Image: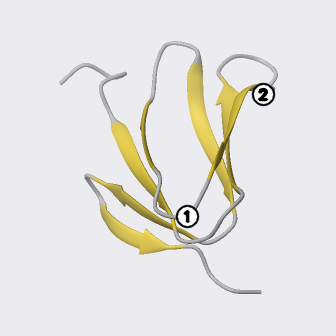
Amino acid sequence: MDQYSDFIIIKAKENGVNVIGLTRGKETRFHHSEKLDKGEVMIFQFTEHTSAVKIRGKALIQSRHGVLETEDE
């Protein structure tokens, strides 16, 4: 399996869920962001440029490692 072929599925459980892609390299930086509304789904693939994803808001996240939900504060 290619090292960049991993992906995650994010389903918003409320309006305004922020999904932010973070770069690879010496310095981690924001390089992409999306705002999802309730019920919207985004499939996010890790690439040569994307090493991490930050999610703000109530969401269901699925990956090859399992399923999890963001927690209420």
What colour scheme was applied to this rendering of the protein? secondary structure
Horizontal side of 19 relative to 11 (left or right) equals right
Judged from this view, the residue extending furthest toward the bottom is 73
Residue at 53% x, 71% y is 13
Asked which secondary structure carries label 1, the reply is loop
Which of marks 1 and 2 precedes in the sequence?
2
**Image location of residue 56, percent across then percent down:** 72, 60
Horizontal side of 37 relative to 63 (left or right) equals right
Position above or below: 43 against 69: above
Cβ atoms under marks 2 and 1 closer than 8 Å: no
Asked where in the image residue 24 lies, by quadrant, the reply is: top right
Q: Dividing the image into 4 quarters, which one contains the C terminus?
A: bottom right
Q: Which amino acid does label 2 sit on?
A: Thr
**Image location of residue 55, percent across then percent down:** 65, 55
Residue picked out by circle 1: 38
Comparing labels 2 and 1, the label whose residue is closer to the camera = 1
Position above or below: 14 against 45: below
Residue at 35% x, 59% y is 62
**Image location of residue 15, percent across then percent down:** 66, 64
Front in this rendered view, residue 64 or 27? 64
Asked where in the image residue 8 lies, by quadrant, the reply is: top left
For residue 20, which numbered disc appears in the image?
none
Asked which secondary structure carries label 2, the reply is loop
Distance between the alpha carbons at the discs numbered 2 and 1: 29 Å
Q: How crowded is mark 2: few (under 14 residues within 10 Å), some or many (20 or more)?
A: few
Residue picked out by circle 2: 28
Judged from this view, the residue extending furthest toward the top is 48
Front in this rendered view, residue 11 or 73? 11
